[in-house]
Amino acid sequence: MTPSVAKMIETIEIELEAPTVQDAPEAGVNPEHLRMVEALLFAASEPLDEKALSTSLPDGADVKAVLAALQAAYEKRGVNLCAVAGKYQFRTAADLAFLLRKEKPEQKRLSKAAIETLAIIAYHQPVTRAEIEDIRGVTLSKGTLDALIEVGWVKIRGRKRTPGRPVTYGTSEGFLVQFGLESVGHLPGLDELKAAGFLEAMPPSGFDVPNPSDSLGPDEDPFDPNEPEDMATGNLNLDQA
């Protein structure tokens, strides 16, 4: 066998061993369905959920299995298939983010009060304005909630079943997408916050990190914008926040 022929055979063997989307570990996954979902996710400008993907696939396609296969196939590549806010999106692998980072002036920065308020809403949701003020120990300044709603990270999610029917606030889908979270249940816990230096190694006795929820609380009703404002005692006036 001549050296040139041996080299050609070696090259073919390497190409055959290279991982492809069709080499998905899940048995029974249709390769054509894999290609279709891959194309849809690649072309989408926003994350897509299983329902949106299924509308473009043949009847009977196992979308959940296809997504699992794609996640496994892309797990060690330059882009990964990530679950964010219950939807799916291709994103640059976390360890390669530095390659695409671009420094530019920040056009708008959140105030310290807004950042504190966002953290309270994220971890304590559903939470009312009065509860936010109680946790922070100060009155919310005018426009703090407005700024968070305007940037698309906070939303009005319901009303408390208490006198005055105050509205409750929570984080939005935009918040989950911005921070790469599948749900609010994936927010950093006590150990992660201590490891990142946000908490002391030995927090005060009895200190614990709340468990936020996307679901309506037992004393919370869905938000109805048509409910009379006098039922909310001014809680709909965000300029007063």
Image: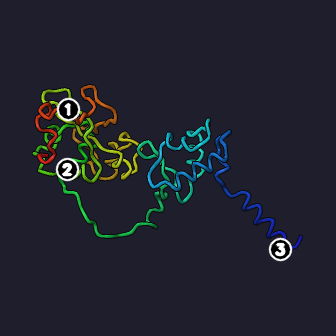
- Label 2 crowd bin: few (<14), some (14–19), many (20+), radius 10 Å: some
In the image, residue 93 above or below residue 71: below
Gap in angstroms between the C-alphas marked 3 and 1 = 80 Å
Q: Toward the viewer: 164 or 21?
A: 164
Say which amino acid is labelled 3.
Answer: Ser
According to the picture, the residue beneath numbered tag 2 turns out to be 146
Indicate which disc, 3 or 1, sits on the residue closer to the N terminus.
3
Gap in angstroms between the C-alphas marked 3 and 2 = 70 Å
Say which amino acid is labelled 1.
Answer: Glu
Indicate which disc, 3 or 2, sits on the residue closer to the N terminus.
3
- Label 3 crowd bin: few (<14), some (14–19), many (20+), radius 10 Å: few
Say which amino acid is labelled 2.
Answer: Asp
Q: Nearer the viewer, mark 3 or mark 2?
A: 2
x and y percent of residue 241 in the render?
Answer: 14, 46
According to the picture, the residue beneath numbered tag 1 turns out to be 227
x and y percent of residue 169 in the render?
Answer: 24, 40
Q: Toward the viewer: 206 or 85?
A: 85
**Helix or strand or loop: what does disc 3 sit on?**
helix
In the visual, does 14 lie left or right of 221? Answer: right
Indicate which disc, 2 or 1, sits on the residue closer to the N terminus.
2
Q: Disc 2, disc 1: CB below 8 Å? A: no
At horizontal 57% and vertical 51% (from top left) the residue drawn is 38
For the N terminus, give its image quadrant. Answer: bottom right
According to the picture, the residue beneath numbered tag 3 turns out to be 4
In the visual, does 138 lie left or right of 11? Answer: left
At horizontal 29% and vertical 50% (from top left) the residue drawn is 152
Quarter occupied by residue 236? top left
**Helix or strand or loop: what does disc 2 sit on?**
helix
Q: Nearer the viewer, mark 3 or mark 1?
A: 1
At horizontal 77% and vertical 63% (from top left) the residue drawn is 12
